[in-house]
Image (cartoon, rainbow, N blue to C red):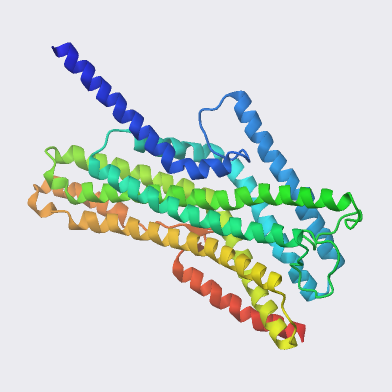
Amino acid sequence: MRKKIYISGDIKETRACTLSNFDFKWAVKLNRYILTPVGLWPESKQTTWKKYTCNLRTFITFILVLFVILIPAIHSLIRIHGDIISMIDNLQFTIPTIAVMLRIAIFWWKKKALSSLMDMIAEDWIKPKAPWEKIIMITRAQTARTIITIMYGMMGMSFIVAICLPLCGFSLRYEANNTGKQLPLQTLYYVYDTTKSPQYEFTFIIQTISMIVGVLPYTGIDNFLSLLVFHICGQLDILKYHIMHLDKFGNYTKALKSCVMDHTRIIRAIGIVEDTFNLMLLALLLYFGILFAFYGFFILNILNDDNSLSISRLLYIITFVVTMSGHMCAYCAVGEILISQCNRIHYAAYSNKWYTLNPKDARNIIFLLIRTNEPICLTAGKMFPMTMATFSSLIKTSAGYVSVLLTTRT
C-alpha cells in the first residue's frame, strides 16, 4: 500500500514539473521565435556544434546589415553632404542601422550572462510553488506577452509599408521628382546601376532580406528586456508577500534568511540586465531624440513650403514615428514599473509586524530595510534613469531642436 502511495506521489510530482516546464516555454516562446533565427537566443546548455551554428547565424546577420545597408548608407551620406533634407532622408535609415548593429554586438557579447538569467527564470518556473505564486508569475508573463505582441505588430506594420509600397511603385522619399524603379531603401548608394535588370531585382531582394534580419534583433532584443523585467517584477511581488507575512512563519529566522537570499538573487539579476542594456538604452535615447527632431522638422518644412505630401510618404512617416515612439515609451514604462516594484519591497519590510517579535528577531529585519532602501533602476549609459519623466523630457528637448533645424534651413 505504501509503495502505491509513493508511486502516485511521484507521478503527481512529475506531472507538476512537466506543467511548470510547459509554462516556462509558453512564457518565453515569442522571444525565442524571434531571436533564434539570428543566433541570439541565450542558452547555457549548448553543444559545440549548436554554439557554432548560432554564432554563424549572428555573424551572417551582422555582415548582411553592414554591407547591404550601413556601408551604402554612409557612402550616400557623404555624397549628399550639405543638403539637409537629403541628409535627413538618409539618416532615418542610417541611425537605426547603427543602433541595430550595436545591439547585436552587445547582446552577443553578453549571451553568457544572459544565459544565467534564463536558467534562473526556468528554475523559478519549474520549482514547486504555491498556487497564488504561479498566478502572479502567469499574470506578469501575460503582460509581457501582450506588450511583445503589440511591438511585433507595430514593427511588422512598418516593415510591410517599407516593402510593399516601393514594390507597388510608390516612393517613400521626400523628393517629389524621384521617379523610376523604387527600392525599400532608395537613399542608399551602390557602385552599380540599380535601375537596370537584373541588378534592380537583386538589390530589392537583398535589401528585403537584410531588413528582415535587421528587424529581428531590433525588436527581439527590445522585447527580451520586457520578458526579463516582468519576470523580475513577478518575483518581487512574491517576495513582497513573504516579507509582509514573516510573522506567520513558524521559523522566523529561516524565513527572513530565505527572503534576504531571494532579494540578493533578484538584485544580481537586475544588475546583469542593467550591465547588458545600458549602452543599448543610451543609443536608443540618442537616436530617438535625433529622429524625432528630424521628423518634426520634416513635417513643418513641408507645411511651410506648401509642398504636397504623398499618401505613401505620409503613411510611412506615421508608421515609423509610431513604431519608434512605441519602443522608446515601452522601455521607459518598463523601467518605471521596475522602480515601483523595488520600492514596494522596502515598504513591505517597513510594514512588517516587527514590533510583535522578540528584540533579537526584530533587529535582524533592520538589515533588510537598509538593503531595500537603495534605489534600483535601469539607466541609459548609467546616466539617465529609464522612466516616463525621462521620456517626456526627451520629447520636449527634441521639439526644441526643431526650431534650430528650421533656422538652419532658412
Which quadrant: the C terminus?
bottom right
The image position of residue 124, as x and y in percent, is 35, 38
Identity of the residue drawn at 63% across and 41% down? 38
Frontmost residue, 309 versus 273:
309
Total numbered labels placed on residues in the image: 0
Q: Is residue 84 left or right of residue 196?
A: left
Identity of the residue drawn at 59% across and 60% down? 284
Q: Quadrant of residue 322?
A: bottom right
Whether residue 385 can be seen here = no
Q: Is residue 90 left or right of residue 294?
A: right
Frontmost residue, 396 versus 298:
298
Whether residue 362 can be seen here = yes
Identity of the residue drawn at 65% across and 57% down? 160
Q: Is residue 228 left or right of residue 163?
A: left
Which quadrant: the N terminus?
top left
The image position of residue 219, as x and y in percent, is 57, 52
Q: Is residue 277 above or below residue 329?
A: above
Identity of the residue drawn at 21% across and 43% down? 256
The image position of residue 6, as x and y in percent, is 20, 17
Q: Quadrant of residue 132?
A: top left
Frontmost residue, 300 versus 234:
300
Frontmost residue, 40 versus 305:
305
Farthest residue, direction front: 168
The image position of residue 114, as x and y in percent, is 50, 41
